[in-house]
Amino acid sequence: MSIPQVAIVGRPNVGKSSLFNWLAGRRIAIVDPTPGVTRDRLCAPVEAGDRYFELVDTGGIGIEDKDELTRDVERQIQLAIDKAHVVVFLVDARNGLVPLDEEVATRLRGLTKPILLVANKCDEPHLEPQAAEFHRLGFGNVLCVSALQNRGKEELLDAIVHSLPRETQSAAEVKEPDLKLAIVGRRNTGKSTFINCLAKEERTIVSEVEGTTRDSVDVRFERDGKGIVAIDTAGVRNRGKIRSDVEFYSLARADRSIRRADVVLHFFDAAKKVSHVDKQLAGYILENYKPAIFVVNKWDLLKGALVTGEFGDYLKRVFPSLDFVPIAFITAKDGKNVQQVLNLAQNLHKQAGARVGTGELNRVVEKAVAAQSPSLRFNRQGRIYYATQAGTQPPLVVLFTNGAHLFDHTYQRYLLKTFRDYLPFHDVPIKMYLRTRGRGEEGDAEGRDKRSRAKRGDAKKPAKIRARARKGATGELWSDI
């Protein structure tokens, strides 16, 4: 059984993206007064009662795109209408019926699928009578809603669910995707072409125009029985060059896509050098401990001019702290090595979810300390009592020490490299916490001497002071909590 699709269509600036975000329950589409902001088809799963459907936002019908992408936007709208099981025809109750609404109605009138006529921006009850004129379009009753004021949501969802085909999946039958991929990078690195190659359809607009993709577009597909979501993002540019609200929100959506992804594919153009923007983007990926792949696209342009090993060494010199990140060379427009990148991403996701036993982890720590012990800091020698893995996605290793401040960053990087060499985390970032054991937990002779001296000192104190000290004891295990 397939997941039904519900497409929102209408002329520009009737509030399609606002309605889309409202029904989806989160801010996905960029909402801006500028006509023509939405270009690609945006999809989001929506659960209503015991039913489940995919909501699709589209560009405005009849808009003339300033970047001459009108034909591409119109093709995306038509694909959404063709694939939809239910069409929501959205109009503006405040502005009333306009000629472009009639043109949209003419385009939809020949469809044999359910069409729901919905009047948005009915912010107050007294505006609902104005929506009566839309009956002239010939689509039956008009549902009055307001995405801004949260009016009529339940009635609209009920109408959508009532119009869905009966043989589709219920909410209980729909599973979460097994893998979420975020496709990020500078403008014109071939991200949308790669997405279309994965989906095996024209899912996003591909153009030489910089900034074609504005929203973060979720594309769902299956490989070998596993559900995968690929998130196409807007091309990242220098924050100082952002000139509009749309560009700002596009960048914010790209950052959020990194945070919610399981694996990030960082795209590079083989014909261009790594820029400052690329370095910032890689730093943000590392900051969020996301498994990543450096994907060098358009490799066919450099055929015979540069071997993969040289370019790989170049990337490792540019990103010395990310030398563990695997590098893939592809030509997205021809589909070359695209499947291999997907297989590698699945492998990284498996690595990030792996667990190792405490015994194995401590043997690796002992081996690391035996090969190179921590240097003296503050006239003290750092000691690691034991280690344990506290979480996955990313792998979280907690080290219990006699003082977290006794381990400098160089030694911490050495430990992380040792973990990657001997544990199943070869190509993914590892989050490591150093815990300082409290005085009551010190297990060495020095700790025992400190406790005995403290007891002798307490014995000399008056009984009332000792009683107050016992009463105020908190019993906390760690001194840094």
Image: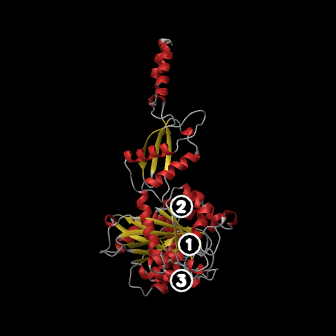
Against 237, residue 111 (above or below) is: below
Against 305, residue 402 (above or below) is: above
Residue 149, how many percent across, how many down? 52, 62
The residue labelled by disc 1 is 308
Q: CA distance from mark 3 to mark 2?
A: 28 Å
Q: Nearer the viewer, residue 387 or 372?
A: 372
SS state under label 3: helix
**Camera-side mark, 1 or 2:** 1
Q: CA distance from mark 1 to mark 3?
A: 40 Å
Say if mark 1 contacts mark 2, CB within 8 Å: no
Residue 432, how many percent across, how many down? 49, 48
SS state under label 2: helix
Q: Residue at x 47, y 66 (%)?
A: 181
Decide if residue 44 is in sight here.
Answer: no
Residue furthest out toward the left:
167
Q: Residues within 10 Å of mark 2 (few under 14, many from 20)?
A: some
* Quarter of the picture holding the N terminus: bottom left
Q: Nearer the viewer, residue 59 or 377?
A: 377
Closer to the chain start, of discs 1 and 2, is 2
Residue 275, how many percent across, how many down? 65, 66
SS state under label 1: helix
Q: Nearer the viewer, residue 281 or 221?
A: 281
Q: How is the image coloured?
A: secondary structure
Q: Residue at x 59, y 58 (%)?
A: 320
Type of amino acid under label 1: Thr
Say if mark 3 contacts mark 2, CB within 8 Å: no
The residue labelled by disc 2 is 256
Q: Is residue 472 left or right of residue 99?
A: left
The residue labelled by disc 3 is 74
Q: CA distance from mark 1 to mark 2?
A: 31 Å
